[in-house]
Image (cartoon, rainbow, N blue to C red):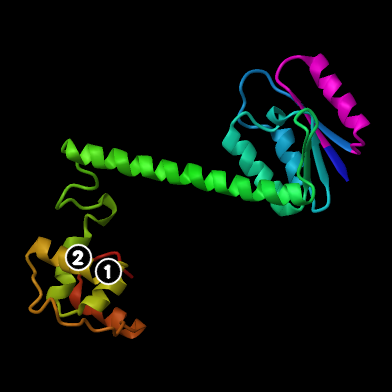
């Protein structure tokens, strides 16, 4: 099926001309959209793209009908070729059918990768320059995420009650052994041997209930169970 899309930002006559040309190109279905000003979202274009299927031909009068940013247009063309949809731009004499589509797909992928790599390189360069000026990134040393503000003290309490690090990780939903040891150092509860391999045994349900009963009273109970 040949599907057309006509887009106009302001002038209605231009939209009518586009529709006429798309009809002459054999489009069986035409989506039309008129928006004033600059709009990033085009609901009719999105609906048109959602309804395209492999083997369809998507036709526009010119490339700026599907976007004004080159990377967005390239990404859309890459996706269309991957879907098995032929794209035709009448004014630009662009047709992605056959070998031309494969070549365009490879070029588009290379350009998108280049853009991504350039962006990453600039981020690293900017970070390096900032560090040279004395700017530090990340949380301040010794600070604790607000969501984890109670965990250092909870780690100490559990550790002092005889629980191995693996069980503390299970109860407090901590993924790293080093994090538990860091919390223990922060609260002064240093392990006797930090290099000793922690036990991998996890508490059973009965052990969890027994521990809750023996260690915590009603006035100071962790919300762990």
Residue closest to the eye, 158 or 91: 91
Question: What residue is rendered at 33% in x and 85% in y?
Answer: 206
Residue 16 horizontal side relative to residue 185, left or right: right
Residue 44 vs 11, above or below: the answer is: below
Residue 134 appearing in the image = yes
Q: The residue tagged with tag 2: helix, strand or loop?
A: helix
Question: What residue is rendered at 7% in x and 78% in y?
Answer: 192
Start-end of magenta stretch: 4-28
Residue 79 horizontal side relative to residue 99, left or right: left
Q: Position of residue 3 (x, y in %)?
A: 84, 40
Residue holding disc 2: 154
Residue 187 horizontal side relative to residue 111, left or right: left
Question: What residue is rendered at 20% in x and 80% in y?
Answer: 164
Residue holding disc 1: 176
Residue closest to the eye, 190 or 86: 86
Q: Position of residue 149 (x, y in %)?
A: 22, 54
Question: What residue is rendered at 76% in x and 44% in y?
Answer: 96
Q: Position of residue 98 (x, y in %)?
A: 79, 51
Q: Nearer the viewer, mark 1 or mark 2?
A: 1
The C terminus lies in which quarter of the figure? bottom left
């Amino acid at each position: 099926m040949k599907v057309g899309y006509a887009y106009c930002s302001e002038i209605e006559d231009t939209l009518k001309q586009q529709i006429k040309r798309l009809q002459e190109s054999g489009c069986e279905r035409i989506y039309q959209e008129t928006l004033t000003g600059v709009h990033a979202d085009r609901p009719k274009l999105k609906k048109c793209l959602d309804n395209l299927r492999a083997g369809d031909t998507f036709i526009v009068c010119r490339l700026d009908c599907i976007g004004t940013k080159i990377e967005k247009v390239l990404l859309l063309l890459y996706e269309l070729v991957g879907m098995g949809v032929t794209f035709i731009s009448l004014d630009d004499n662009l047709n992605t059918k056959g070998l031309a589509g494969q070549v365009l797909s490879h070029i588009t992928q290379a350009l998108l990768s280049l853009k991504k790599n350039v962006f990453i390189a600039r981020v690293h360069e900017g970070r390096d320059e900032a560090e040279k000026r004395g700017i530090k990134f990340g949380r301040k040393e010794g600070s604790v995420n607000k969501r984890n503000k109670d965990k250092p003290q909870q780690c100490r309490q559990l550790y002092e009650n005889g629980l191995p690090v693996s069980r503390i990780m299970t109860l407090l939903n901590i993924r790293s052994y080093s994090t538990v040891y860091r919390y223990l150092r922060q609260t002064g509860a240093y392990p006797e041997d930090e290099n000793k391999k922690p036990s991998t045994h996890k508490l059973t349900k009965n052990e969890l209930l027994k521990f809750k009963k023996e260690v915590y009273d009603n006035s100071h109970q962790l919300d762990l169970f």
